[in-house]
Image (tube, rainbow, N blue to C red):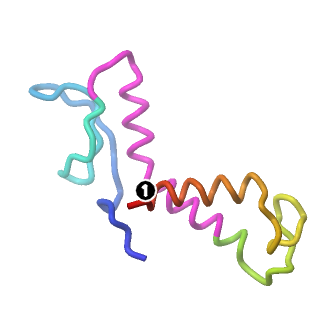
């Protein structure tokens, strides 16, 4: 599936001028302006900038967990993968679904 967001890498930086605050960029394209607030703007920009990498990592980990025969044990719980609904699987699936929602 092709992602519907601007491809990475994304990076954050602090800009002054007309739009002061921490920004998230994909090359020269502005992804987000996190504004200038009580110090959280820098960290908000950093986590937004990491989003494409975090999504790729979550997909890779979930694929690795789901790889192989269905009766293989989940490395997180030791239960057969086909019945495993552990917190790790749910968190990865939910995060990926949230990122891919239309």
Q: Is residue 48 above or below residue 79?
A: above
Q: Quadrant of the C terminus?
A: bottom left
Residue 88: image quadrant is bottom right
79 or 33, nearer to the observer: 79
Q: Quadrant of residue 100?
A: bottom left
Q: Main secondary structure of the magenta part?
A: helix
Q: Residue furthest left?
A: 18
Hey, which quadrant is residue 3 in on the image?
bottom left
Where is mark 1, residue-wise?
A: 52
Q: Position of residue 76 (x, y in %)?
A: 82, 59
Residue sitting at x 44%, y 50%: 51
Query: Looking at the image, which residue sits at the far right?
Result: 78
Label 1, secondary structure: give it. helix
Left or right, residue 49 beside residue 75: left
The boundaries of the magenta stretch are: 35-62
Q: Is residue 37 above or below residue 8?
A: above
């Amino acid at each position: 599936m092709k992602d519907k967001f601007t491809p990475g890498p994304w990076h954050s930086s602090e800009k002054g001028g007309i739009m002061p605050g921490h920004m998230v960029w994909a090359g020269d394209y502005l992804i987000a302006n996190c504004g200038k607030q009580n110090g959280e703007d820098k960290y908000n920009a950093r986590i937004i900038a990491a989003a494409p990498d975090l999504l790729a990592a979550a997909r890779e980990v979930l694929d690795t967990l789901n790889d192989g025969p269905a009766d293989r044990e989940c490395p997180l719980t030791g239960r057969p993968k086909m019945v495993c609904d552990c917190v790790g699987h749910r968190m990865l699936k939910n995060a990926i679904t949230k990122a891919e929602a239309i």
